Image: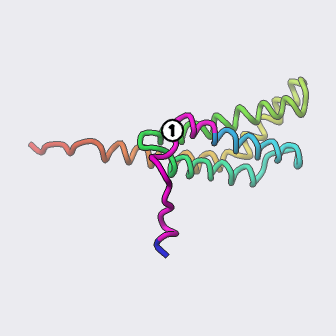
Amino acid sequence: MSSLNKIAIQGPGLKKQGIFVLQTFFIGVFSFLDLWLRSGVGVITGIVILACFFTGIRFGRPGTTYVAVVVPPLAFAGTALLWILLLDGLKPSRVGIDFIAALASQAPYLIIGSLYGWFVFLNAKAKKKPPKARS
């Protein structure tokens, strides 16, 4: 039962580049599938975004938490814009509306993941500081 609590990984974990590539890949693939099948991003992409936050923090090396928190929103925005441009063509009004709708539909997932990630990052940073001397 205790093996379910902590998954043992071999080696020190993912580097910053590995976190970036894996998060961008998974977010890109699932946002494409959502846009292609449903003509808009939905819950599946949101769950993948949250999973990318949590797995990036969990499987990254020490010191990679910042990258694991910053990449998912940027990766989603970049891949959503790319897929919308490819699927809709160069129609500025259509692309703009679809892009803003995609960002708005994923806002709760991005906010929840960012809050958790920044909490983990700032908490680890605060634990590294030595305690202040009392005067």
Location of the C terminus (image quadrant): top left
Relative horizontal placement of residue 88, taking residue 24 as reference (left or right):
right
Most extreme residue toward the bottom, as rendered? 1
Note whether residue 19 is visible: yes
Figure colour scheme: rainbow
Residue 40 image offset from top left, x and y in percent = 83, 45
Q: Secondary structure at mark 1?
A: loop
Quadrant of residue 81 in the image? top right
Quadrant of residue 36 in the image? top right
Residue 30 image offset from top left, x and y in percent = 76, 46
Note whether residue 116 is visible: no
Relative horizontal placement of residue 71, taking residue 120 as reference (left or right):
right
Residue 85 image offset from top left, x and y in percent = 84, 29
Q: Nearer the viewer, residue 122 or 15?
A: 15
Q: Nearer the viewer, residue 72 or 61?
A: 61
Q: Residue at x 31, y 47 (%)?
A: 127
Q: Nearer the viewer, residue 98 or 2?
A: 2
What amino acid type should be assigned to the residue bearing mark 1? Lys
Q: Nearer the viewer, residue 56 or 122?
A: 56
Residue 42 image offset from top left, x and y in percent = 78, 51
Q: Is residue 30 above or below residue 90?
A: below
Badge 1, how many Cα within 10 Å: few under 14, some, many 20+?
some
Residue bearing the label numbered 1: 15
Quadrant of residue 94 in the image? top right
Most extreme residue toward the left, as rendered? 135
Relative horizontal placement of residue 125, taking residue 36 as reference (left or right):
left
Q: Which residues are magenta?
A: 3-21
Q: Is residue 28 above or below residue 92?
A: below
Q: Residue at x 81, y 42 (%)?
A: 32
Number of on-image labels: 1
Q: Is residue 121 magenta?
A: no
